[in-house]
Amino acid sequence: MQFYRSHVLICAGTPCILKGCGAVRDAFITELKNQGLEEEVRVVETGCLGPCDLGPVIVIYPEGTLYEKVKISDVPKIVDEHLLKGRIVRDLISEGSIPGIIPYKEPVYFGIQERIVLRNCGIIDPSSIEEYIARDGYQALAKCLTEMKPSEVIEIVKQSGLVGRGGAAFPTGLKWSFTANTKDDQKYMICNADEGEPGTFKDRLILEGDPHSIIEAMTIAGYAVGATRGFVYIRGEYGLSIDRINQGIQQAESMGLLGDNIFGSGFSFKLEVKKGAGAYVCGEETALIESMEGNRGEPRVKPPYPGTHGFLGKPTVVNNVETLANVPQIILNGADWYRGYGTPKCPGTKVFTMTGDINNKGLIEVPMGITLREIIYEIGGGIPEGREFKMAQTGGTSGGCLSGEMLDVPMDYFTLPEKGSALGSGALLIMDDSHCIVDIAESFMRFFVRESCGKCAPCRVGTVRLHEIVKKVACGDGTYEDLEILEDLGRTMRETSLCGLGQSAPVPIMTMLRYFKDEFMAHIEEKRCPSETCKL
Amino acid sequence: MKTVEDLERIRKQAKVMTKLREGGETTKVVVGMGTCGIAAGARETLSAIMDELARRNIQDVIVTQTGCIGLCEQEPIITVERPGEGKVSYGKVSGERARKIVASHVINGQVVGEWVIPAS
């Protein structure tokens, strides 16, 4: 095996690809050849490191030096100074540090993160199964298949307190037990990678950065519930995720980690990718299953739930990507270890994608129960241009909005709903005081009108009416009664819609009405926009 | 792969590929690569160290570089630091000397006294 004295890790997550990391990689390879260093320095493409706004990002080991916004013209300098002469190029290094990467300086941001889900992202080459195995990959699967009964696997996941990270927060162990306890000749395991919430891209970066963790977790889940076939349902736009998972499946099959009689245990598991066509509603598990069966992506009437009647009418577990990525670590380290993170009621970590009016945009993983203030001002580096924080939207469009008074509320799946909000899937859209709430509400509702599948009346008609009324207010033609109708209609939709789409479509408006009613009133009574940004 | 032992074997083999990125206690060889070092032939010294380690299939040694430390007349300088032991700096390390230092000090822990730069 070739010995390299230095590794250059180039982040090849989609955000960095868009910023041209491919050309930077080629420049490194060329420049290393020019300097005669190609036998000494290895160039590795890796998954997302987190600071997406600073891309292309590279890390050079063994020093663990993080370079940001690397241009092709910087490469000769980095090679000549750092890789040849050992002098860090100070004007290109990042101020921050990332857990798992040896920091060059004291951490400024990304400091209070914990990495369980993202433990390999940005550290391993995702196209190498060997590097995954080197970081204890497939050890959890080996442990399950050779030392544990399926019921014991479910028990440890139950004990860990892991809940679904797609937004619904259903206890994962309980979900598995429904399927495990149903007798049938065929059961299925599905990974929901139809990440459709605007602003959410965590699942994509997990799949791109550490595909084998999902393959391993799905095999473990299959063993636990008695499923012999699995599907990763990935939205079609996620080209790189699809490639990486397909490549991972091939590697795992050729090593005997997928297929027949894994580890000689008698357990067999086959995995394949299904591509989604981009409908927002297909992130809802029964609509997803309909889509997999070749039907229109529309939700089913529940009950029965997929756990007993899912894909092709057979018992099926559907888990989110991030949920699954926790599983191998829980198996290896135990439920008590996992409970050491987060809050007693909601253990573990949460992956967020930070976007909007915030200095450090990108991918972060933090313990459950962290406050919004810590995320924005410690990890996120605050609001740009000295502006004031106005609101944060959690979980894409279907989560709730959090106002300034919620800055110190612990963020987890149980505390936020008590405050009338929701944690959602992990998008965190930060807005400063230059935005008009009514304008934002209008754009959110426009999204739901477009994405409602039309199967049930409360959602099909409700989203259109909500949008009409909000638009009316935004144009200065609203009345006080309109706000009452909004509340009433929202309540009806929440209670009577068939699936999560219609049930959560009014949530942003309802929470905005609660925290920013005066802004709606200013549009109605004074025909004026307090933030002076909308067309009034 | 048929057994857990097979997985463990692959893990051990693969570990060396990622070890560099995980820090931890390991032997470190630092080569002075300032202008003075390079002019005195440090490039050749570094290549010799890499070659010697590869030839002996040694994977858990970190080889890195540093700039001028102010002893230009002693270049090429290399410093060897084994876990739990002090730093030892060698002066005028040619490729030939470097190979000997790798064999004797880096691998077997025997300091090569005659080339050590004495602490003043």
Image (cartoon, coloured by chain):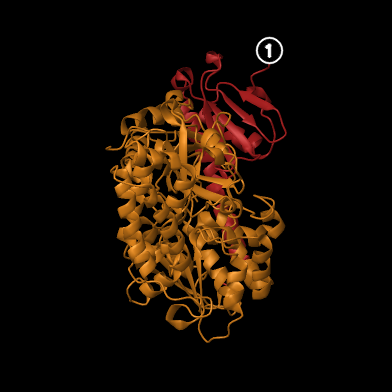
Chain colours: A orange, B red
Q: Nearer the viewer, residue A207 or A345?
A: A345
Question: Looking at the image, is A464 positioned above or below residue A477?
Answer: below
Looking at the rendering, in which quadrant would you find the C terminus of chain A? top left
Is any part of residue B24 visible from this angle? yes
- Secondary-structure class at tag 1: loop
Q: Which amino acid, by three-letter code, is at mark 1?
A: Ser
Q: Nearer the viewer, residue A232 or A522?
A: A522
Query: Measuring 68% from the left and 16% from the top, which residue is drawn there?
Result: B119
Q: Nearer the viewer, residue A476 or A410?
A: A476
| Count of marks, rendered view | 1
Residue bearing the label numbered 1:
B120
x then y, percent, for residue A187:
51, 80
Q: Which chain letter goes with mark 1?
A: B
x then y, percent, for residue A377:
53, 33
Is any part of residue A101 visible from this angle? no
x then y, percent, for residue A386:
44, 26
